[in-house]
Image (cartoon, grey):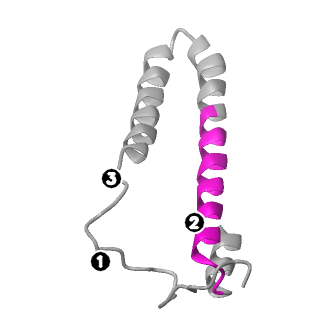
Amino acid sequence: MRGVSRMVEDERYCIDVVTQINAVRAALHKIALGLVDDHVRHCLKDPRRADEHADELMDAVGRMLSLEQQPKYGPVGSFQPRLGWTTCRTLSPSS
């Protein structure tokens, strides 16, 4: 996250920043799936707490899925940058 923030502060080409954000999201998604896998393989083995752990798991999976299904695009002009940037470089990375 700090790397992405630094890219914005350094006014890097917007498409490069978006590409990096997507890479971070993919890495976090992979970590989350690994944690879910570990939970299924270990925590659900205890029959005394299986229902409790299954409920926790389903809540976590539900949150993951709801994040994935958020609208991809809002109305034009609805985006408000939060990182302090005011403009995006319009030059291509090779310029």
State which tag comes first along the sequence, 3 or 1.
3
Is residue 23 rendered to the left or right of residue 49?
right
Density class for disc 1 (Cα within 10 Å; few <14, some 14-19, many ≥20) is: few
Image coords of residue 1 (percent x, y): 65, 67
Residue 74's place in the image compared with 13, above or below, is above
* Mark 3 residue element: loop
Q: 30 and 63: which one is in front?
A: 30
Is residue 83 rendered to the left or right of residue 1?
left
* Mark 1 residue element: loop
Image coords of residue 51 (percent x, y): 43, 16
Q: CA distance from mark 3 to mark 1?
A: 15 Å
What's drawn in magenta, residue-wise? Answer: 11-33
**Which secondary structure type mostly characterizes the magenta part of the structure?**
helix
User: Mark 3 against mark 1, which lies toward the viewer?
Assistant: 1
Question: What label sits on residue 77 in the rendered view?
Answer: 1
Q: 46 and 11: which one is in front?
A: 11
Q: 47 and 75: which one is in front?
A: 75
* Residue in the image at 61% along x and 12% along y: 45
Q: CA distance from mark 1 to mark 2?
A: 18 Å
Residue 85's place in the image compared with 19, above or below, is below
* Residue in the image at 50% along x and 17% along y: 49
Inspect the image, locate mark 1, and give the three-letter code of the amino acid beneath it: Gly
Q: Quadrant of residue 46?
A: top right
Q: Which residue is mark 3?
A: 71
Q: Which residue is mark 2?
A: 18
* Mark 2 residue element: helix
State which tag comes first along the sequence, 2 or 3.
2
